[in-house]
Amino acid sequence: MSTSPRVEEILSWYDTDDVATRSCLRRLLEHGRTAHSGKLVVLPVDQGFEHGPARSFAVNRAGYDPRYHARLAIDAGCSAHAAPLGAIQRIAKDFAEELPLILKCNSSDSLYTGPDPLPALTASVDDAVRLGCVAVGFTIYPGSAGRNVMYEQLRRLVAQARDAGLPVVVWSYPRGSGISKEGQTAVDVVAYAAHLACQLGAHIVKVKPPTAHLEMPAAAAALRESGTRLDTLADRVRHVVESAFDGHRIVIFSGGPAKDTLAVLEENRQTALGGGFGTIMGRNAFQRPRTDALRLLAEVMDIHRESRAHAVSGAR
Amino acid sequence: MSTSPRVEEILSWYDTDDVATRSCLRRLLEHGRTAHSGKLVVLPVDQGFEHGPARSFAVNRAGYDPRYHARLAIDAGCSAHAAPLGAIQRIAKDFAEELPLILKCNSSDSLYTGPDPLPALTASVDDAVRLGCVAVGFTIYPGSAGRNVMYEQLRRLVAQARDAGLPVVVWSYPRGSGISKEGQTAVDVVAYAAHLACQLGAHIVKVKPPTAHLEMPAAAAALRESGTRLDTLADRVRHVVESAFDGHRIVIFSGGPAKDTLAVLEENRQTALGGGFGTIMGRNAFQRPRTDALRLLAEVMDIHRESRAHAVSGAR
Amino acid sequence: MSTSPRVEEILSWYDTDDVATRSCLRRLLEHGRTAHSGKLVVLPVDQGFEHGPARSFAVNRAGYDPRYHARLAIDAGCSAHAAPLGAIQRIAKDFAEELPLILKCNSSDSLYTGPDPLPALTASVDDAVRLGCVAVGFTIYPGSAGRNVMYEQLRRLVAQARDAGLPVVVWSYPRGSGISKEGQTAVDVVAYAAHLACQLGAHIVKVKPPTAHLEMPAAAAALRESGTRLDTLADRVRHVVESAFDGHRIVIFSGGPAKDTLAVLEENRQTALGGGFGTIMGRNAFQRPRTDALRLLAEVMDIHRESRAHAVSGAR
Amino acid sequence: MSTSPRVEEILSWYDTDDVATRSCLRRLLEHGRTAHSGKLVVLPVDQGFEHGPARSFAVNRAGYDPRYHARLAIDAGCSAHAAPLGAIQRIAKDFAEELPLILKCNSSDSLYTGPDPLPALTASVDDAVRLGCVAVGFTIYPGSAGRNVMYEQLRRLVAQARDAGLPVVVWSYPRGSGISKEGQTAVDVVAYAAHLACQLGAHIVKVKPPTAHLEMPAAAAALRESGTRLDTLADRVRHVVESAFDGHRIVIFSGGPAKDTLAVLEENRQTALGGGFGTIMGRNAFQRPRTDALRLLAEVMDIHRESRAHAVSGAR
Amino acid sequence: MSTSPRVEEILSWYDTDDVATRSCLRRLLEHGRTAHSGKLVVLPVDQGFEHGPARSFAVNRAGYDPRYHARLAIDAGCSAHAAPLGAIQRIAKDFAEELPLILKCNSSDSLYTGPDPLPALTASVDDAVRLGCVAVGFTIYPGSAGRNVMYEQLRRLVAQARDAGLPVVVWSYPRGSGISKEGQTAVDVVAYAAHLACQLGAHIVKVKPPTAHLEMPAAAAALRESGTRLDTLADRVRHVVESAFDGHRIVIFSGGPAKDTLAVLEENRQTALGGGFGTIMGRNAFQRPRTDALRLLAEVMDIHRESRAHAVSGAR
């Protein structure tokens, strides 16, 4: 398998991980249309579990079938496809060799919700190994009263994944009674969330695109005094990436709810400009008709792979 | 053992399961009056635990004896018989070879109830193996504050059952403070419940016949905009089955409280028409006199096995 | 060891238990004055733990010594003696060979009480094996908010006891915020409690003599419509025994607080007439002077062993 | 090692314990100034943990050093010295061979307190074995809402100690929202607490000297009707000892807060007269200047070893 | 490796620890600029986790990179560097041989806070071993309602660390609803916190510099009556050190929030004068420009290593 200097550089940041884990990271970084660029574009489909099948798939009914998404990810040249246990079980035999799979190991549904989210553990590292996955995924909600339960579950998952030679992708989504609704995407909060995921052992961190809002007065003061620029999304992405061990961890940004194509492309341009490592884009892909989705994913991948502004700090 | 193309097709959806688990699924699909049709009609008797013996058995006192139900299931040609540990222990030696048994592994009683149900674990995969059962059964209550405890218990049961080569039947019954009373059978909620069970690793999902009520505004909007038809029970069953991996998981519908024969038959006709995989019918069977029960079960089985409308999506 | 057709019949109901467990059941059924009759009269002494030593033993101070009770049980010809860990440890070396011992594995004290009882686990199957006991005992309180914790503890105890070849005796005492004070002995509730214990894997069930009170409207309606007779204690005992797998589990009735001799004898006559399998009588025995206790126990045993009315359904 | 008939008699009460456990009990009973008498005088120093170092040691600053207490216990001829993990680790290498050590396995501090105490587990049987201790110690608080957690922790400790061949000393101190402040030392409550510890498997029970207060109406009535004498401390000690398996378990009495020498001596005389097995005296020893402490301990030991009134029932 | 009489003396206090654990302690005591002096100056960087990256690193942006701190600790001659899992994983391969690393095993973030702190477990002894660390670190919050959970987690960590041959450094920070804000640094509370950590098995205890405030009336009275001097910081440090087994455990003092250089130096002079074993100084080091930090650390180290007033009691 050919590789690239940038991929080698990125892998060098994970030098306490063993060969098996780094091989899986390498496979993600060398797969699909963004191969060799050090960027990742992942197709996640856990919205059926999180929001229900109707909200997720009724608009494009082919999506009721888990196999549709695996095929879409392959045809679009995605770096990987992430999904919960049941869907991965449905697709693994036919697709795991051709497409890097990420097993999502915890999930929440929307039939009961409270102020402090705490997902259920729904899959294990053993499942990931058995099903030929290249990584496991896990969501934490910093700001929730249940955060420490999640951190401890993540700690165990990280240890088990290490034993199995699998990297861990952490969805770090601030949410809960500790922070305001607006604070969930505040740049200081998102940067903190990225830092926490890194400290907890994440190999790849997924956060939301940060807004200019500042939630925590002490952080706001420190950022102001230090002259940290936070005006554009690119600036804010840069701050988030810097907060992830000065750019030495892979940080990707999620796409959020479906929106128009221009908005998606602009968001990805800013992310790439700020040194983000790519995107994880679900509803904006699978809720579009297949040909539209393929075209949009191709454009997004090209934005990232052609970006010359590598992560600000990672490139030092 | 002879088999049929439809059974082979159904088994192909479970291609990440091992031979032992698929053999048990095959045994269910090739047993009794609905053998070869890809349909299941199961006799469940956990009402003694759930509602108490008087409410369950006083009307037909032969039912106090667990052996009565095993004999009824055999004579009617049911696909399987499901019951809690004690009853299965009472009948396994004499009936397990002749009748596929499903060990119900959690149960709730009615002497203490609260707004958010969370059943007790009352049996294990080890018990099922020891007693010659072909599957284990488990109830989840999406919508309950205790849902995540159940999901995690189910995750462990699924893993243990896999190790033992047994499929898992999930009773997915929305209930609890997260949803309204009417919402428990709302079609969007039932479809969501079926999807959750599939994502959690269920091989067979049991839900209630869905009503036309819509509980969740966002799901209602998505269904309306997509033009999903929900007018008849058959339409709604079709939506539920579609939500179960586009019809690639076995979804059966429960009968609910005892009602008149015509209503039972019509409900099953609609279920079959919508692509449902059969029924799990307890009180409507064992609370009738034996001859009536045998006649009703035969008619229900014939409705299902003669149905040509296979699961909408499964037949694609 | 000689045996009897009735004992063989009873043992045939436990045909999924292994030889070791059935041997222990047989030892109980073939020991003491009621040997061969299929009836059991057990002396339980856990009142020191449950109510405190003064309330239990001050009236007959010999009872402060655990050895007194073991000697009393032997001299009276009891089927077995049940007690908590400490007492069994005090007596096992000298008495376990001569007297079947039942180790009580959970207990509650009265220094702290709340509306929803949940006893502490105070002994294990390992202790029972080490101390030469023939069975383990466990209390559940259906109707308590903590019921499911108890059911799950019982499930584990049942599995461990099976591995050790010991039967499980379940004290099934409805109590807690789910039911009224009067409901604790209501016939519908007691029958439900007996059924639950059987479903949870009990070999022997101990319940309280049921009153004519009916607690649950739906059960009351079902019993009324079915014409179930509940007028006399014998009628009610018959209903409770029927609810225990149609009389195919051993159900014995506790004596409750100390009362006069005639009342004790009449209660046992009714129990025997209704098909009960005997009694477990503590305070009415050990709080009487030794000679009185011996005489009363002998009369009670004779009532049971001479009863021709075997369990209504068991005799079918 | 020479022994005495009384020690042999006491050991005979523990005939279901194995040789290793009984050897440790024997070592306690044959050590120090009370050797051969069947009495124990133990020096406990967990007050630094429980009340803080200033309240415990400022008055006699030598006590800040754990080695001071070990030396004091040796020079005074104590039967044993009890302390938490850290202190035992500090002294074990130099003192464990010369002085029987009891590792206190749970403790509470005073920086946070609530109405229902529940200590932290702070050491294990493995620690005791590793550090050459002859017994483990454990506190239970009957009357606390957390009592059952403690009972279950004790059950596990007792099982682990048995496997390791170590006896268990239980501090049974009624306390919590279930009883009044005055009730903590009420004679009916203390007797109940002693009985509970015995039922839970304690080899040695430590309680507080009981007052004449009666907390529980039913116990008060039973004691009154039975004519149990409770006037003097000796009477009350006799009732407590009787409640501990009729005097067949070792029950010792704690000294409580520091008080004057005459009061200490009188309390011990009464304890000895009532059949108590000795005392466990901390603050009254180590908070006195060393020479005073040595003199007082010697006098207390002489009271106990010269007592001819062995435990009322134990001597039968 | 050369050593010193003082280091040998200190190691003699840990005589129940095995060779591996004492070798790690020795490595800490013989490393860096304070080698041979019996003093420790540690650089901790867990503020990114605890307070967020902006508050911690924006002022000196080099600190976003975990490698910056490792290099700073080496160049300054620190005894060790402490950090959470993620950061240690980032630096271990390049720095663990040159710099003693302490893996912080629990942490709290600031996105959700409550009155009673209880950190998440975020790393394990296995991680420490794998990453070549010489010790593990753990925070307890005496005074928190969650204190006992932390004590029990610490107990398990201590046992696992012993098995792995690693010493345990305990951050003992009183905090929570049991004490006032001012009480968190009250001298009686800090002394109590140090004592608790020692009793729980800590090898090295880290506390905050104590103020003259007294929180607990009974402790205040005992200190007053005993004439304990608490006027200067040195006096108070002496009391704290005395409370740690009379100075036979290593107690170091944290630096707290960033402050001016003179204040830092004076605080360390007082600490050294009172017999403290050094300091653990984070923000006052890494938030200064690198050259300033190197100069300040050198001055602090010289204060400690040149201190002739060894721990008051330890030197006896």
Image: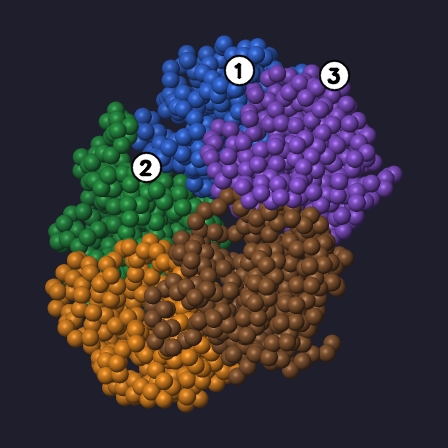
Chain colours: A brown, B purple, C blue, D green, E orange
Tell me the kind of residue under disc 2: Leu
Q: Is E149 positioned to the left or the right of C205 in the image?
A: left
Where D139 sits versus B274, above or below? below
Total marks drawn?
Answer: 3
Foreground: B133 or B253? Answer: B253
The residue sitting at 55% across, 47% down in the picture is: A109
Query: Pointer 3 and pointer 2: residues touching (CB < 8 Å)?
Result: no
Q: Which residue is mark 1?
A: C221
- Marks 3, 2 in one chain: no
The CA span between labels 3 and 1 is 25 Å
Foreground: C172 or D65? Answer: C172
The residue sitting at 26% across, 63% down in the picture is: E184
Q: Residue D228 is drawn in which quadrant?
A: top left
Where B152 sits versus B66, above or below? below
Q: Position of residue A286 (x, y in %)?
A: 66, 55
Q: Which residue is mark 3?
A: B291
Q: Which is in the foreground here, disc 3 or disc 2?
A: 3
Foreground: B242 or D302? Answer: B242
Q: Chain of mark 2?
A: C
The residue sitting at 36% across, 40% down in the picture is: D196
User: Helix, strand or loop at disc 2?
Assistant: loop
Quadrant where the C terminus of chain C sits is top right
Tell me the kind of residue under disc 3: Thr
- The 10 Å Cα crowd at callout 2, few under 14, some 14 to 19, many 20 or more, is many
The CA span between labels 3 and 2 is 57 Å
- Marks 2, 1 in one chain: yes
Q: Position of residue E172 (x, y in %)?
A: 33, 66
Foreground: E314 or A26? Answer: A26
Q: Which residue is mark 2?
A: C111
Tell me the kind of residue under disc 1: Ala
Q: Chain of mark 3?
A: B
The residue sitting at 46% across, 34% down in the picture is: B114
